[in-house]
Amino acid sequence: MKNHGSSMIKVKKRKILLLPGDGIGPEVISEVKKIINWFNDKRSLDFEIDEDLAGGCSYDKHGTPITDEVFYKALESAVIMLGAVGGPKWDGVEFSKKPERALLKLRKELKLFANLRPAICFKQLVDASTLKPEIVSGLDIMIVRELTGGIYFGEPRGIKPIENGERKGINTHIYTSSEIIRVARIAFDLAKKRSNKVTSCEKSNVMEAGQLWKEEVQSLHDKEYKDVELKHMLADNCSMQLLRNPKQFDVIVTDNLFGDMLSDQASMLTGSLGLLPSASLGAKNKDGEMRAMYEPIHGSAPDIAGKGIANPIASILSFAMALRYSLELDKEADTLEKAVQIVLNEGLRTKDILSKGAKEVSTSEMGDAIISKLQ
Ligand code: NAD
């Protein structure tokens, strides 16, 4: 793979690579596959589907969480649909071969720098939240997290021995202007298609990198996005405001570390892990091509794997994001999202979101019900 830098491989515009992964991953991605096939059959969209191994299943077969061959396929795909990777089976595997390394490699090598995580509270499921219904009902936030920079990647890093037998752990929080600007641009562009409001979060009161973040976001706003409302907020305050009054937010843009926490917090406002999608976008090249990976925010749920009860909606809505952001098929994305709403309105529920009076359905019945509403 050494000779195949991401810039040398052309992206095939309609190629979708399915990487179902481990645990419930294959169960939920198989519902996505049915939907892609529906679009191919009924709307003649000519998606080219490929499917392969990543994560623990790849380790079991090939001794590595992602092979060069699969990585090559990922490079030439416009869309990667990932299920989930990992599980207790691979707990003892050495760090560099752990299932999660497949994900990190894809994010890093494909330069997927912007992680989009919507936190939507479907009104039909408002009781699933731990917050009062009036606080979360109708909630629709988009968190944009910087994904390839900051303290998770900064150098120097490591654990080093120091004098007197002690050790020190080092991580470096580092951002350049261009890293900040490219992710802020994604947030401003998204806000324009939503409620036109961006909240940028950092810790400019105690961190120089946070101060730079604030300055660069403000300067991009003043140059190119004056028509979008911009607010700066300290990340700790944002965390508090997400619980106090989450509906004040539209798009939140923040760095890798704060984004990791704030997006988890925001997703739990909705109380339903099985419903929330995510997208990780790369930069567009000079031909306008972009690589991107879409995945549910939940993990491989080993506790329910193989039982046919996993909720496929998070994965299906991840595909709706792919239709919108990678495949430029907004109308089809709307159609798919509406089909999910109709099915929820009709009271069909997988076990994780089951409530009184609703009808319990299996993973594949939920997928079929959504397909039946696509017409
Ligand atoms: P998890 O998200 O897999 O599960 C948490 C709980 O939510 C479980 O009770 C599970 O049954 C339930 N759940 C999750 N998704 C569901 C769905 N679609 N339908 C119904 N119920 C659902 O988190 P975890 O248990 O902390 O992690 C399990 C494994 O997944 C670990 O190995 C972890 O490393 C891995 N993981 C992978 C990813 C990823 O691939 N992106 C993300 C998170 C965790």
Image (cartoon, rainbow, N blue to C red):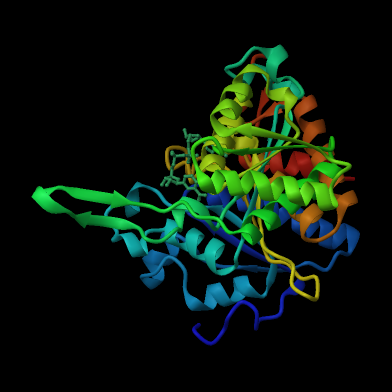
Question: Is 118 located above or below residue 13 in the figure?
Answer: above
Q: Quadrant location of the C terminus?
A: top right
Res 364 quadrant in image = top right
Residue closer to the observer: 101 or 358: 101
**Residue located at (45% from left, 53% from top):** 152
* Image spot of residue 265 (x, y percent): 55, 31
**Residue located at (65% from left, 43% from top):** 214
* Image spot of residue 199 (x, y percent): 71, 36
* Image spot of residue 340 (x, y percent): 77, 37
Is 292 displayed left or right of 153 in the figure? right
Identify the residue at the far bottom of this view. 3
Do we see residue 239 in this rendering? yes
* Image spot of residue 352 (x, y percent): 57, 29
Identify the residue at the far left of this view. 164
Do we see residue 321 in this rendering? no
Residue closer to the observer: 163 or 91: 163
Is 203 displayed left or right of 356 in the figure? left
**Residue located at (52% from left, 37% from top):** 261
Question: How many marks can you see?
Answer: 0
**Residue located at (81% from left, 61% from top):** 327
Res 273 quadrant in image = top right
Residue closer to the observer: 32 or 156: 156
Question: Is 273 located above or below residue 127 in the figure?
Answer: below
Question: Is 268 located above or below residue 35 in the figure?
Answer: above
